[in-house]
Amino acid sequence: MNILYIIDLIGVTVFAISGGLTARDKQLDVFGIAAVAFITALGGGTLRDVLMGSTPVGWMVDLRYLIMIAAGISVSLMFGERVRKFRRTFFLFDSIGIAVFTVLGLQKALALGMHPVIAVMMGMISAVFGRVTRDVICNEIPLIFRKEIYALACLFGGTIFILLRYLDIDSTINILVTIIIIFALRSLAVRFKWNLSVFS
Amino acid sequence: MNILYIIDLIGVTVFAISGGLTARDKQLDVFGIAAVAFITALGGGTLRDVLMGSTPVGWMVDLRYLIMIAAGISVSLMFGERVRKFRRTFFLFDSIGIAVFTVLGLQKALALGMHPVIAVMMGMISAVFGRVTRDVICNEIPLIFRKEIYALACLFGGTIFILLRYLDIDSTINILVTIIIIFALRSLAVRFKWNLSVFS
Amino acid sequence: MNILYIIDLIGVTVFAISGGLTARDKQLDVFGIAAVAFITALGGGTLRDVLMGSTPVGWMVDLRYLIMIAAGISVSLMFGERVRKFRRTFFLFDSIGIAVFTVLGLQKALALGMHPVIAVMMGMISAVFGRVTRDVICNEIPLIFRKEIYALACLFGGTIFILLRYLDIDSTINILVTIIIIFALRSLAVRFKWNLSVFS
């Protein structure tokens, strides 16, 4: 689906900007900012492809991803903190990006013949792992392991996708429903500060 | 060998519990605990398979590993610190797990035509790398790079395995001997606080 | 080219020594020093090969790399800080190593049919990523993301290589020119303390 591809490219850009800003906060230099932006944007899809043996990894055969990331890096270098003013728009695209990454990762895994349970995991990894790597490189315990709950939203949305697929729901509708679920869950979680803390 | 497979599954579960407990200590949330448990249990085998190009990685084609890990995660969530009361049992299974991981990794590498020296390394990586990743994610310098010496036990045991194999010792006996050596070395090392410190 | 192969082996050894010394500074034990030396020396090439799907990874099919690394580890264990007395020689080989790693990574990527832009990235990753991993494992934000600028020298040299290749310059001359450029850029950057800091 063409529209998914376009959202995927936008999502990658937004992820790159968010990675670049984190790297700025850590006082990294220009190369460090570019590297962390890159890893944040593509780390998830890269791990997914490497685990499934689908190499060379996706972004290595479609340069548009690198171009969009270069744009994202430029934005975080030029505008820096001022980008955060648009944090609502940012959050919007970020959440849509997460949802689309999940669906695309899931579909790719299914297309490669993975078991549905594994496919759901691959979808989640696509959406989540870039940030995990970003945090580990920036010497932080991954935020998503402590507070943010969007990985669960990805797993839940992915499961719904698989269920609807068994029920032979039209694929376009299924994709749309899944994206909306992930988007909504994540937004609600942030809004109402849902968390999964074991300790109160 | 069927019994090795069963011990492998038990080992994975024990590794998952130990990963989950470490994550709890770090105050991670439920997803973080699950993720770290998962990485601790499967990180070693995953790296081994990726390096050898044996993808999709093992656990992606045999869901029993995920099921056992889910069980391990549940245990560390429900019982938490109380699990540590059984630390002798725990240590027993952990050490057997390490030994079995080494042998299975080694055998897989040999089956894929790797040089014996590389196969010994792959065996050690299978047993060790999950914990290395766990520690790096939890923002610690890997324990095994500082104090624990079981990687050396794995390398030593693996070398014995290769030697006995050249001497055409029966494979079952060879596996048993190797497992006992690794298990014994590790237990002795912990008991007598052997270490490899360069600084006294 | 035979001479490149020899320099590659020397570069790997120098990288191993530098990794081993960093690990000593962190008070790691013998296994930790060996592991970090190993990862510093081979991490870059390993990531490059895994991303491109060229597995088993290079060093797994040519044991000479492991032998050279073992030598490098012995040097950092035996001589420790005293190695630093030769820091000029060290820096010389290190810079040549970086340049050669870049060219070899780049050539391998082109040989596997990668797009030139991707090939330049693969060259840089070969030269840089081992140290990034070393720093992450040693619980530091990668130095190369904060101060050192040699990644940029690798990218610049790689780009020159691609350009000269389009102009049908003789391959040996091209390799030589590229290595000299990377070497010179890095040396100048260190000498004059060039940096890419966003913050003054």
Image (cartoon, coloured by chain):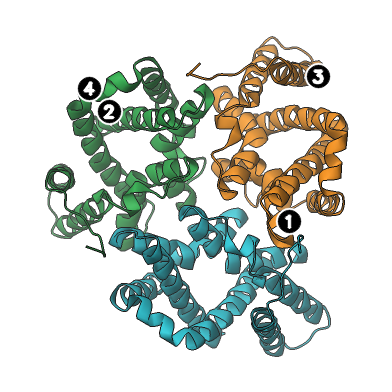
Chain colours: A cyan, B orange, C green
Task: Verify CB contact (< 8 Å) between mark 1 and mark 4.
Answer: no
Which SS class for mark 4? helix
Task: Verify CB contact (< 8 Å) between mark 3 and mark 4.
Answer: no
* C70 or B174, nearer to the observer: C70
- Same chain? Circles 2 and 3: no
What type is the residue that disc 3 sits on?
Leu
Q: Kindly report the distance in space between the C-alpha atoms of the residues bearing marks 3 and 4.
A: 49 Å
Q: Kindly report the distance in space between the C-alpha atoms of the residues bearing marks 1 and 3.
A: 32 Å
Q: Depth-wise, is mark 2 or mark 4 nearer the camera?
A: 4
Q: Kindly report the distance in space between the C-alpha atoms of the residues bearing marks 2 and 3.
A: 42 Å
The chain to which mark 3 is attached is: B
**Residue B143 visible to an observer of this rendering:** yes
Q: Which residue is mark 4?
A: C85
Against C43, is A7 above or below?
below
- Same chain? Circles 3 and 4: no
What type is the residue that disc 2 sits on?
Ile
Instruction: Find residue A90 and report its horizontal and vertical position in percent.
Output: 48, 83
Q: Earlier in the sequence, mark 1 or mark 3?
A: 1
Q: Which residue is mark 2?
A: C6
Q: Kindly report the distance in space between the C-alpha atoms of the residues bearing marks 2 and 4.
A: 24 Å
Please tell me the numbered disc located at residue B34: 1
